[in-house]
Amino acid sequence: MQALTDLTDAELSQLVAENGGKAFQARQASHWLWKHGVQEYAEMRNLPASLRTAIGNRLPLRRTTIAKSELATDGTEKLLIGLHDGEHVECVIIPEGERTTLCISTQVGCPVRCVFCASGMFGVRRNLSVGEIAEQVLHARSRLEAGRRLTNLVVMGMGEPMLNLDALLPALQRIHDGNGLDMGARRITVSTSGYPRQMEQFAAADPSYNLAVSLHAADDTLRKQLVPTAAHPVQEIVLAAHRYFGQKGREVTYEVVLLEGRNDRPQDAITMVEVLGALPCTVNLIPWNPVEEIAAREGLRRPSAQRVDSFADALRRGGLKVTVRRQRGADRSAACGQLRLRQADPANG
Ligand code: SF4
């Protein structure tokens, strides 16, 4: 079953026409849906009641709800989104000065199963639909204080975006579209753990979004320990990312979740410089947000600020541009997938 949020403009026009409406009424319905973010057909005030009822009998307006929210003292708000089949995903609103970034999910769970991540602990359950992806933006927008707007979108939440491009690309189109959520493509970043063939498909999409690659380690053996399902060698992934840069002119960001003693050693930095040093890119270091259960099972620790600084300095000395992500929402379920994990089993709280 679909919702109105799953439809393209053409499909919405067809639905309205099939129910006796005119083209301009399809545009009005779209405007209510995306610009006003209405939650009930009754709120589409300039559409005839008969048309609203007829469409409403065919499709629900939305299919997701906010099941739970957690607000951290730094203003970061995590939303647990309830899906029609009882599943849940997360999205996170991160305010920082004038900027407000939203991180969204693309799958229920994740097939990549990175050893440090709560989202991948139980693998993937299913892909999200176009509407389920786009509705996360509608929900987040409804939580903002008056005068604040979402300035950036990162597709870095639960799931591997490249494995759900069929839904993600139309959803991003809706989020980017001036008649939809009207967010500039330069403000949208999609992150992948590295699927070269799908990265090519992503590169063929119009407009040009930013690409981030979750690398975590530049050495294949080490990377395989951290990302057990990694099927492609680092060189192949980096080559695909570099082709993306060549095609789109968008510099790629490499994300590295830093784990003490596992991938933050001097040798790990040297290998990263060897692999990335000559490329136009930025490396974003993310000191791991510990999830107790995973820390105990895998023996993982968040590195000290000093170790993170040493690693960053070594990369910079090798000519790389480096940023270090500040921990946000630390007093609430900060790690990706943690809120969903607690929802599934309160003992994990
Ligand atoms: S870190 Fe990202 S890619 Fe890895 S398991 Fe978690 S959600 Fe999936």
Image: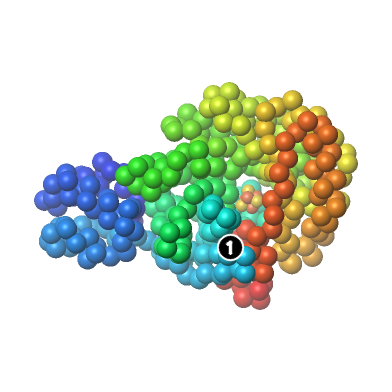
Q: Amino acid at mark 1?
A: Thr
| Image label count | 1
Which quarter shows the N terminus? bottom left
Q: In the structure shown, which secondary structural element does the residue marked by tag 1 occupy?
A: loop
Viewer-side residue, 15 vs 305: 305
Is residue 223 in view from this perspective?
yes
By what rule are the colours in the image chosen? rainbow
Residue 52 sits in which quadrant?
bottom left
Left or right of 284 on screen, residue 182? left
* Residue 122, visible in the rendered structure: no
Quarter of the C terminus within the rendering = bottom right
Going by the image, does 3 lie left or right of 251?
left
Please give the name of the residue rendered at 67% of the width and 69% of the height, measured from the top-left corner: 331
Q: Nearer the viewer, residue 346 or 250?
A: 250
Tell me: residue 278, above or below residue 121. Answer: above
Is 263 placed left or right of 289 in the picture?
A: right
Q: Is residue 22 left or right of residue 207?
A: left
Residue at 58% from the left image edge and 63% from the top image edge: 76
What x and y, as percent, mark residue 232?
A: 68, 34
Residue depicted at 13% across the width and 59% down the height: 48
Crowding near the residue tagged with mark 1, few <14, some 14–19, many ≥20 C-alpha atoms within 10 Å: many
Residue 297 location, quadrant: bottom right
Q: Position of residue 101 (x, y in %)?
A: 54, 52
Q: Residue at x 83, y 56 (%)?
A: 304
Indicate the position of residue 278 as horizontal and vertical percent values: 74, 25
Q: Position of residue 173 (x, y in %)?
A: 40, 41
> Extreme right residue here?
266
- Judging by the rendered image, the residue that carries numbered circle 1 is 76
